[in-house]
C-alpha cells in the first residue's frame, strides 16, 4: 500500500498471471507497477475525495501503416487521464509579484517544513538567504530567482506564478459596534475573553496582553480587531476554535498583529464552519504600506491554523521543533521574513475537508 499523489488514504496494486489462482501484492515502489502485468489497482478513501476526481477517455479510429499489409486499414486508439481536486502540498506562500526578498531568511535562521514553498516574485532576488540561514522543505517554486546556497532541495526557478490560494474565501461578517474598546491585560491573573468586536485606534491596540503571571483563555469564536491590531508581549495564551480578523473602519485605523517576547501557549483555528483552518485573517483592503505583522513568540508557542496577511509582510519565527510544532501551520502573506528558527507541519487529519488549500492536478 502506498500514499498516492492525490493523497488518497491508500492504494493496493495486485497482479496475477492468466489462469493462475494466486495473486501477488506489489511493493510500495511505484516503478514496479509495470512488472508482471496485468494488475488491479484499488484505492480507498472517503466517497467525497474519490468523487473529486474525473476520468476522461478519448477514442478514435486512426489509419494504420504496417498493419495495412494484413488488411487492417484502421484501428481504434484510446487515451485516458484522471484529474481532480487535491490537497496542496504547499504551506508557505509569498504573494508579492516583484519584491526583492519576498521570502527572506537571515542570521542563522533554520526553517524546516513538511511542505512546500511558493514565491510569486519575479525578482532576481525573490528568495533571499544570507548569514548562514538554511531552509529544508519538500519543494520550493520561485517565479524569479534566488540567492544563497543552503536550500534543500534546490529551488526551482522561472516557475509560473500561483494566485492567492485563498482569494475565493469570503471575509467574515461582523458588527462594527464595539463590544470592547482598547482592551488591555497587564496584571498577573487568569482571564477569559469572549468573541466579539474589539475596537482600537492608532494609539491603542484592540487587544493588548503583557506582563508576567498573565494567563488568558480565548473562548471559541471570531475576534474582530476593529482598528489598532493586536499586541501580545508576555503571558500564556490559549484558545481552541478561534479566528482573529484584523480590519479597520472609520475612526479605527488598522494596526499590525504583534506577538513577541515570552508569549507561550497554544492557539488553534476552527475545525469546521466558514472560518475553518483560519487562525489570523487580515482584511484584504488593508494597504500594502501598512506596518509589518510579527509572530515571534517563545519556543513553547504553538499556532495551529492559517496566518493570512495577503497585503502586508509577515515576520515569523516559530521556534518549535518539527516534533513539537502544531499539527499544521500555513503562512500566506505579501512577503515573509523568517526572523527566527521555524518549524511547520502539514497534518490536516483533524480537518474534515483536509487542507484548506486545494489544487487541481493530474493524478494519472
Image: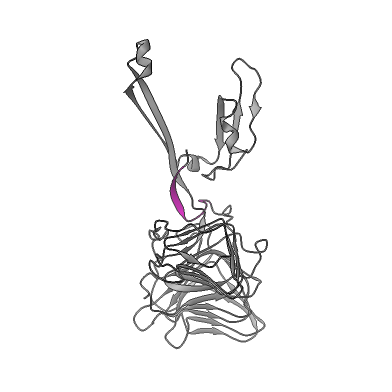
* Residue 39 x/y as whole percent: 56, 27
Write the start and end of the magenta stretch as one range: 352-362
Image-based side of 155 in relation to 71, left or right: right
Indicate how the structure is coloured in the image.
one colour
Magenta span has 148?
A: no
Q: Is residue 108 left or right of residue 208?
A: right
Closest to the observer, 243 or 61: 61
Most foreground residue, 354 or 79: 79
Answer with the quarter of the image where residue 171 lies: bottom left
The x and y percentages for residue 62 are: 32, 23
Is 358 part of what is drawn in magenta? yes
Q: Can you give x and y, in whole percent of width and height, for residue 252 in the image?
A: 39, 82
Residue 157 x %, y %: 45, 58
Q: Residue at x 32, y 22 (%)?
A: 61
At x 55%, y 42%, the residue is 4
Quarter of image, res 74: top left
- Relative placement, left or right, of 24 versus 63 is right
**Residue ID at (65%, 35%):** 27
Which quarter of the figure is the N terminus placed in? top right
Q: Is residue 14 above or below residue 99?
A: above
Q: Residue at x 48, y 65 (%)?
A: 146
Image quadrant assignment for residue 105:
bottom right
Residue farthest to the top? 71
Q: Is residue 287 above or below residue 22?
A: below
Identify which residue, 195 or 251, lies in the foreground: 251
77 lies above or below 148: above
Amino acid at each position: 500500500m502506498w500514499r498516492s499523489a492525490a493523497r488518497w488514504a491508500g492504494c493496493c496494486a495486485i497482479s496475477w498471471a492468466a489462469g493462475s489462482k494466486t495473486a501477488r501484492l506489489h511493493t510500495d515502489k511505484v516503478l514496479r507497477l509495470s512488472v508482471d502485468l496485468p494488475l488491479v489497482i484499488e484505492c480507498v478513501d472517503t466517497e467525497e475525495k474519490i468523487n473529486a476526481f474525473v476520468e476522461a477517455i478519448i477514442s478514435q479510429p486512426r489509419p494504420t501503416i504496417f498493419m495495412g499489409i494484413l488488411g487492417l486499414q484502421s484501428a481504434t486508439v484510446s487515451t485516458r487521464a484522471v484529474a481532480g481536486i487535491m490537497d496542496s502540498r504547499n504551506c508557505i506562500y509569498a504573494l508579492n509579484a516583484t519584491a526583492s526578498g519576498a521570502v527572506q531568511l537571515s542570521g542563522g535562521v533554520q526553517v524546516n517544513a513538511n511542505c512546500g514553498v511558493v514565491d510569486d516574485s519575479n525578482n532576481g532576488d525573490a528568495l533571499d538567504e544570507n548569514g548562514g540561514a538554511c531552509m529544508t522543505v519538500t519543494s520550493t517554486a520561485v517565479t524569479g530567482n534566488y540567492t544563497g546556497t543552503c536550500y534543500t532541495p534546490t529551488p526551482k526557478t522561472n516557475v509560473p506564478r500561483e494566485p492567492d490560494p485563498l482569494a475565493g474565501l469570503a471575509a467574515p461578517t461582523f458588527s462594527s459596534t464595539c463590544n470592547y474598546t482598547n482592551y488591555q491585560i497587564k496584571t498577573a491573573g487568569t482571564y477569559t475573553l469572549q468573541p466579539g468586536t474589539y475596537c482600537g485606534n492608532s494609539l491603542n491596540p484592540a487587544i493588548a496582553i503583557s506582563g508576567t503571571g498573565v494567563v488568558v483563555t480565548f473562548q471559541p469564536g471570531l475576534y474582530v480587531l476593529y482598528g489598532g491590531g493586536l499586541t501580545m508581549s508576555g503571558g500564556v495564551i490559549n484558545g481552541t476554535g478561534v479566528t482573529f480578523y484584523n480590519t479597520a473602519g472609520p475612526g479605527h485605523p488598522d494596526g499590525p498583529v504583534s506577538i513577541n517576547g515570552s508569549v507561550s501557549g497554544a492557539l488553534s483555528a476552527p475545525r469546521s464552519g466558514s472560518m475553518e483552518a483560519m487562525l489570523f485573517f487580515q482584511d484584504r483592503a488593508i494597504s500594502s504600506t501598512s506596518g509589518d505583522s510579527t509572530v515571534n513568540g517563545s519556543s513553547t508557542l504553538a499556532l495551529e491554523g492559517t496566518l493570512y496577511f495577503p497585503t502586508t509582510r509577515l515576520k515569523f519565527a516559530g521556534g518549535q521543533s518539527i516534533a513539537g510544532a502544531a499539527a499544521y501551520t500555513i503562512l500566506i502573506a505579501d512577503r515573509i521574513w523568517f526572523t527566527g528558527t521555524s518549524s511547520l507541519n502539514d497534518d490536516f487529519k483533524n480537518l474534515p475537508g483536509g487542507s484548506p488549500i486545494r489544487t487541481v492536478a493530474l493524478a494519472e
